[in-house]
Amino acid sequence: MDFTLSENQFNLVYNSYSFVIAAMGAALLFFLLIRGRVAPRHRMAVTLSTLVVAIALYHYVRIFNSFSDSFSYVGGEYVQDGRPFNEGYRYVDWLLTVPLLLAELVVVLKLTAGKTRSLLVRLTIAAVAMIGLGWPGELSDPDSTARAVWFVLSMIPFLYILYVLFVELGRSLDRQSDRVRKTVDALRYIILATWSIYPLAYIAPTVIDNPATSEVVRQVGYSIGDVLAKPLFGLLVLGIALIKSREDGYLEAGGADIDIVTPDDLSEIVNN
Ligand code: RET
């Protein structure tokens, strides 16, 4: 659907993409630089975070260019009359990164091999289903029944993922130390809060009548979600990997006493 954005609306979306690119790039460098401070047996989680932000960095450059190319500046406004904006980059990005994000959380816990496998398989299938079922709805008309049906279908795997994280993962936490358990507990609430941004942004075109406003809300919403769900989440998982490294007695010269996040910080974030 072609529409027109005011200069401020266009810039808000444009700048939010630019912000995400900077955040992903910085996170990529940070995860690469920090990995030596994590004990080798806990590095897999950091490697997965590194991949996630690298994949997102690439896709956001594509999204940014596709968005800019679809508009021309005419009479003080941005008219979407160019090449169609390709939302597909976002879904391909999620298809790759959401299973990796869930894997981060699972592998950092170092559960038994059987439990890890079973969680990874089920969470990956659910993540792929959630995104695959959301995509056809994204392409359909905002007020169509089709969009509502795809939304509901996509919510099923979404709720299943939350069930696995809150109920099943909860049961496997008994063997973790107090600090790790508290951090993981907070992390699950952070997933709940940040991942809920996506379905909300998705329904923006249905609940907001003005197509320009709803497009801005959707794009900025997804961008905020991506910064919280990828770099921030990666930092929190890194926090767990560092706690576990220290619990295992891994001391790296000069690097033993950094604390990215403490369980106290996390409970503060969650409680506020
Ligand atoms: C869709 C479609 C509508 C229903 C639901 C959705 C959920 C999307 C989610 C995406 C999470 C993406 C992340 C990306 C970060 O890397 C597909 C919008 C429930 C939860 C975490």
Image (tube, grey):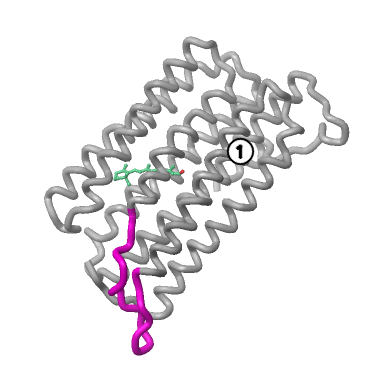
Callout 1 amino acid? Leu
Q: In this view of the protein, which residue sits in the foreground, 192 or 270?
A: 192
| Residue under the point 46% across and 51% down | 59
The image position of residue 56, as x and y in percent, is: 50, 48
* Quarter of the image that includes the N terminus: bottom left
Residue 197 sits above or below residue 153 on the image: below
- Quarter location, residue 163: top left
| Residue under the point 75% across and 33% down | 36
Most extreme residue toward the left, as rendered?
145
Residue 272 sits above or below residue 119 on the image: below
Check mark 1 vs ligand 1: CB closer than 8 Å? yes or no: no
| Residue under the point 38% across and 44% down | 92
Q: In this view of the protein, which residue sits in the foreground, 237 or 7?
A: 7
- Quarter location, residue 38: top right
Position of residue 129 in the picture relative to residue 219 (left or right): left
Magenta stretch contains residue 113: no
The image position of residue 60, as x and y in percent, is: 47, 55
Residue under label 1: 236
Which quadrant of the render holds ligand 1?
top left
The image position of residue 187, as x and y in percent, is: 54, 35
Give the prevailing secondary structure in the magenta stretch: loop
- Quarter location, residue 69: bottom left
Q: Is residue 214 visible?
A: no
Q: Which residues are magenta?
A: 70-87
Q: Is residue 62 visible?
A: yes
The image position of residue 270, as x and y in percent, is: 54, 42
Q: How many numbered tags mark residues here?
A: 1
Magenta stretch contains residue 82: yes
Crowd band around label 1 with a 10 angstrom C-alpha radius: few (<14), some (14–19), many (20+):
many
Position of residue 263 in the picture relative to residue 14 (left or right): right
| Residue under the point 18% across and 53% down | 140
Residue 60 sits above or below residue 51 on the image: below
